[in-house]
Every structure is written in structure tokens, then in C-alpha cells.
Amino acid sequence: MTILKIILITVGVAFTMFGYEIYFQKKYNLINGFEEDYKAGRKTESYAKRVGLTEFILGIVLALIGICVIIVR
């Protein structure tokens, strides 16, 4: 069970970091194939921001769940 808690927090921190880099630092190259699709007109900058924000929020939620599980147990 301890390994699950560690994995949950690790995944949460990783998603938070990637989401931060994409949404706030505008490193859109972290999204697979985005640059080619952007040049071809299939994807927009708002798509990349939406992906970054989703990852950022999901990462925070996962990390908080992992921390809460450790505190409660």
C-alpha cells in the first residue's frame, strides 16, 4: 500500500510539473506532435493551454489525494 501512495504522489508531481511547463511557460513541444499539427492548422494554441491546465489541475488533485491518504492512515 505504501508503494501505491508513493506512485500516486510521484505521478501527481510529474503531471503538475508538465502542466505548469505547458500552461505557464508555453513549452508546447511537451505535447506529442503538437508543433506539426499546429503548423498544419489542426491544433490551436488554446488546445495546448487546455491540455496544460488539465494536466496541472489533475496533478495537483493526485498529489493532494496521495498526501491525504498518508495523513489519514
Image: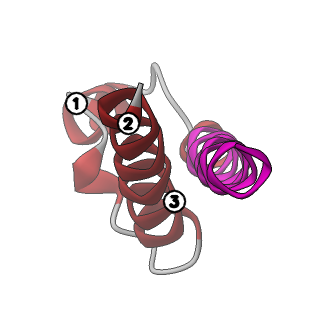
Along the polypeptide, which appears first: circle 1 or circle 2? 2
Closest to the camera, between mark 3 and mark 2, is 2
Relative height, residue 66 to residue 16 (above, below): above
Cα separation, mark 1 vs mark 2, equals 32 Å
Mark 1: secondary structure = loop
Query: What residue is pinned by disc 3?
Result: 16
Q: Work out which quarter of the rendered image holds the C terminus and state it.
A: top right
What range of the chain is rendered magenta?
49-73
Query: What residue is pinned by disc 1?
Result: 32
Under mark 1, the amino acid is Asn
Query: What residue is pinned by disc 2?
Result: 2
Under mark 2, the amino acid is Thr
The quadrant holding residue 24 is bottom right
Mark 3: secondary structure = helix
- Most common secondary structure along the magenta stretch: helix
Along the polypeptide, which appears first: circle 3 or circle 1? 3
Residue for point 49% across, 28% down: 43
